[in-house]
C-alpha cells in the first residue's frame, strides 16, 4: 500500500512539472516574439480630369436676304452695293423708296432686271422693294453722303412762306411730281413757261431734282443735282437740266434741247 501511494504521488508531481514547463515555454515564446504590425495601404482612387469640352467653331454664315418683299434700310438691309440676279425666267424688279405710304412720290429709282446686275442702297433710303431677285452684298459701301452744296447767292432773308403761287416748304401743293417726297424740304422751286421744278433735300443732306411738264404731265426725278452758279444742275443719261432764277436750260453735250424762261421761283 505504501508503495502504491508513493507511485501515485510521484505521478501527480510529474504532471505538475510538465504543465509548469509548458506554461513557461509559452510565456517565453510570447515574450521572445514581438507583435507583428501589418500596415495596409488603401489604394487612393485615381481621379481622371474630365476631357476638355469640345469647342465648336462658330462660322458666321453670310446673311441671306429674301427674294421678295420690302426691306427697311438699317433694319432688314444695310446701305451698300448689292449684286442682283433674277430668280425667275422672266426677270425681276427693284425699287428704292423714300417712304412706305404707298404713294407714287415714295419712288426714288427702280429697274427691271433681266440678268446679272447691281443696285446701290443709299443711307438716306427708307426701304428697298424687290420682286424675284436674289441679293448678295458685294462689300462695296454706298457712296458717301454728298457734301453740302455751295449755297446759291442769298436772295435776302428766307421768307416764312415761299413767295410762289400754290407752294409751301416742300414744293408745289397738289402736284406730287413737283413736290418733295415724304417730309423732305425744298431748297429751290420754280415755274417756267412749260414746267414746274423743285430741288429737295433729304434728312441726311442728299439732294434730288423733280420736274413735270405741264402740257402732258411727263415727270422726271434725278438724284444728286449739284449747285452751279445761282442754281442747280441735274444730269440724267448725259442730259443736263440747269435751273436758275432766269430759266430751265436743257442740254446734251453741246446741243441745246430746250430753254424755258423762269416765270417765278424761290430759293432757301
Image (cartoon, rainbow, N blue to C red):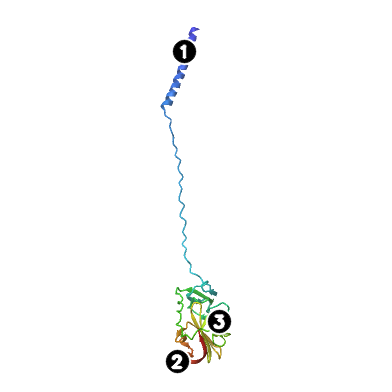
- Label 1 neighbourhood size at 10 Å, few (<14), some (14-19), many (20+)? few
Q: Are marks 1 and 3 in contact (CB under 8 Å)?
A: no
Rendered image quadrant of residue 132: bottom right
Q: CA distance from mark 1 to mark 2?
A: 166 Å
The answer to whether one can see residue 9 in this image is: yes
Mark 1 / mark 3, whichever is N-terminal: 1
- Mark 3 — residue? 105
Question: For this rendering, which residue is in front, 206 or 139?
Answer: 206
Q: Quadrant of residue 182?
A: bottom right
- In this rendering, the label closer to the viewer, 1 or 3: 3
Label annotation for residue 10: 1
Q: Secondary structure at mark 1?
A: helix
**Label 2 vs 3, first from the N-terminus:** 3
Residue 231 position in % (x across, y down): 47, 86
Percent of width and height locating residue 217: 56, 88
Q: Residue at x 55, y 81 (%)?
A: 105
Residue position marked by numbered label 2 in the rendering: 255
Q: Earlier in the sequence, mark 1 or mark 2?
A: 1
* Residue in the foreground of this view, choosing between 42 and 81: 81
Q: Residue at x 45, y 17 (%)?
A: 17
In 3D space, how far apart are the residues under numbered discs 2 and 3 (Cα atoms)?
31 Å
27 up-or-down from 119: above or below: above
| Mark 2 burial class by Cα count in 10 Å: few <14, some 14-19, many 20+ | few
Residue 94 visible (yes or no):
no
Residue for point 46% across, 12% down? 10
Closer to us: mark 2 or mark 3?
Answer: 3
**Label 3 SS:** helix
Q: Position of residue 123 (x, y in %)?
A: 49, 75
Amino acid at each position: 500500500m505504501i508503495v502504491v501511494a508513493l507511485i501515485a504521488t510521484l505521478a501527480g508531481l510529474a504532471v505538475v512539472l510538465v504543465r509548469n514547463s509548458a506554461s513557461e515555454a509559452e510565456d517565453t515564446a510570447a515574450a521572445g516574439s514581438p507583435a507583428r504590425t501589418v500596415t495596409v495601404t488603401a489604394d487612393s482612387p485615381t481621379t481622371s480630369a474630365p476631357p476638355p469640352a469640345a469647342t465648336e467653331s462658330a462660322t458666321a454664315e453670310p446673311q441671306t436676304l429674301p427674294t421678295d418683299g420690302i426691306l427697311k434700310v438699317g433694319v432688314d438691309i444695310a446701305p451698300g452695293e448689292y449684286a442682283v440676279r433674277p430668280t425667275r425666267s422672266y426677270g425681276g424688279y427693284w425699287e428704292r423708296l423714300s417712304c412706305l405710304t404707298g404713294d407714287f412720290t415714295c419712288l426714288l429709282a427702280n429697274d427691271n432686271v433681266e440678268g446679272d446686275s447691281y443696285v446701290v442702297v443709299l443711307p438716306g433710303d427708307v426701304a428697298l422693294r424687290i420682286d424675284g431677285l436674289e441679293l448678295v452684298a458685294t462689300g462695296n459701301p454706298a457712296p458717301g453722303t454728298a457734301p453740302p452744296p455751295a449755297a446759291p447767292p442769298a436772295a435776302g432773308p428766307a421768307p416764312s412762306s415761299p413767295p410762289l403761287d400754290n407752294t409751301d416748304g416742300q414744293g408745289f401743293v397738289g402736284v406730287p411730281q413737283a413736290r418733295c417726297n415724304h417730309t423732305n424740304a425744298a431748297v429751290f422751286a420754280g415755274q417756267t413757261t412749260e414746267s414746274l421744278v423743285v430741288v429737295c433735300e433729304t434728312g441726311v443732306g442728299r439732294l434730288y431734282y423733280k420736274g413735270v411738264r405741264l402740257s402732258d404731265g411727263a415727270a422726271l426725278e434725278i438724284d444728286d443735282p449739284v449747285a452751279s452758279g445761282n442754281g442747280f444742275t441735274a444730269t440724267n443719261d448725259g442730259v443736263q437740266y440747269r435751273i436758275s432764277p432766269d430759266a430751265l436750260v436743257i442740254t446734251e453735250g453741246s446741243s441745246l434741247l430746250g430753254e424755258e424762261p423762269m416765270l417765278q421761283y424761290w430759293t432757301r
